[in-house]
Image (cartoon, rainbow, N blue to C red):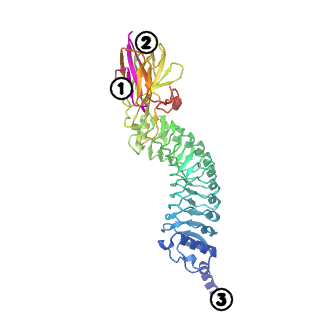
Amino acid sequence: MRNSVVFIALVLLPVSFADAQIPTAERNALIALYNSTAGAGWTNSTNWLGAAGTECTWYGVTCVGGYVQKLSLGSKNLSGVIPAELGDLSNLEELSLYNNQLTGSIPSELGSLSNLKKLSLMMNQLSDSIPPELGDLTSLSTGLMLNDNQLTGSIPPELGKLSHLQNLYLYSNQLSGNIPPELGNLVSLLRMHLYDNQLSGSIPPELATPMNMGNLYLNDNQLSGSIPPELGSSHNLWRLDLSNNQLTGSIPPELGSITTLRNLHLSSNRLSGPIPPELGDLSNLEALSLHSNRLSGNIPIELGNLSALLGMNIRFNALHSENATLIAFLNSKQTLGGDWQSTQTIAPENLTVGSLGDHTVWLSWDAVTYQSDPGGYEVFSAPTGTGIWTSGGWTEAKTDTTYPVTGLDPATTYDFGVVSYTDPHISNLNVVNSDFSPEVMATTASGGCAQPIIEIAWGDPNTLSVTGTYDSYNWSTGETTPSIVIDSLSGQWYWVTVTSAGPCEETAATSGYQGTLLLADGFESGDTTRWSNTVP
């Protein structure tokens, strides 16, 4: 009989704990949540506002040992603001209020929930900045989910104190400023999602020291600067997405060391230079996106080693290959827009020298096949042996196949090269330049002919006039008068060929743009550093 009484008492014991009254401060916190978020309109508010001692039976409330341990009211039509009183739930381990219509700011008082392991406030309409006090939630492990809100301001560096955090979701807000390097202290992080914000500045190399995360999403921001090579030391990284930013410089070859990588997305940036052959070491890579950058040069044959690759997109760059096997392999993996070669800005072929004057050399070439987006060609010259290249101007269309290089010295041997360019368009916001064409050599004549001079009268419109008197005038616009009128906003190049007794036939060229002359490649005349080792 005595044993039976003990058994009955033990059976009833958990029930008595479950029905035990929680502290008054916790009950008041729950009531404050109900009142501030229109509890009467929740899709499920079973038992809420019942008598003292019933709080642990209220829908979404889980208690352990007489305290609230979990509060889960996701997708229950909560509207209004999050009350500061929730900071009194001192034993709370999970707070999930996702996918509601919550407005206002995140209370800084939530930073006092020292036992909290998961905070999910995503998919609401929360505004203002992220409270730095959330960095005091040092027990957070499962995740900090604040995505899909209207949060503004910068990411607090205090979040770097969350050393146990495995998932950080801040995407689809209006966050701005730099990514704090302190986030590199998140040594337990598996996933970091920061995309769809207005974050700026460079990617801190501290993110990779150390890094054991599975996913790093920094896409759809305003990040600038270069990709830190330190990311190559990342461990267990499965997906790296830096697309849709303003990143510049080259692709670090160190990324080829992330052998766990399955997805690499660097598209829609301002990256330049060649594809590093080290990317061919990514034996587990399944998806590769490099499109809509300024990448140029010969595609390394090592990319043919990507045996796990399911799809890629390298369109809208200046890439090329002469390897038939590699071309076929890349074509088989190109997933969007068809043939990857059809949108590459490549150098024109068959550059040849036409007529020669004392100060003019006429060049011609074959038009490139990629003409669906606007662009043209820029011509360069260098006295042979000097390596000092100077731009002589550019054409306004990819259909143009001739151009006069003017202002040369008589009886001088020059090297000439041509670069194709594609202007910004809907699929790529960059100016994309090809490699240099194979150069040709020519020596100017020495017939004693003078170099004609074009004067510009700035106004609205502008007037171009040839100084002096000549027998005939032939402008690139088709006009045959000593002067022509051009659009005051014109940035294109004009030239005129004149003849005089001798006989002499010479050409002069000028840009119709008033102000500092910037060539199509974005650099001042003579600066060919954009092409690095591809300069002839």
Tell me residue 517's x, y (percent).
Answer: 49, 29
Residue 362 in which image quadrant = top left
**Which residues make up the magenta segment?**
481-506
Residue wearing tag 1: 477
- Tell which of 381 and 318 is nearer to you: 381
* Dots 1, 3 in contact, CB < 8 A: no
Tell me residue 199's x, y (percent).
Answer: 55, 49
Callout 1 amino acid: Thr
Q: In the shown orientation, is residue 356 left or right of residue 124? A: left
Q: Is residue 65 visible to us here?
A: no
Residue 179 against residue 103 in the figure, above or below:
above
Q: Which mark is residue 449?
A: 2
- Tell which of 391 and 96 is nearer to you: 391
Residue 21 in which image quadrant = bottom right
Marks 1 and 3, how far apart at CA: 113 Å
Residue wearing tag 3: 2
Residue 114 against residue 173 in the figure, above or below:
below
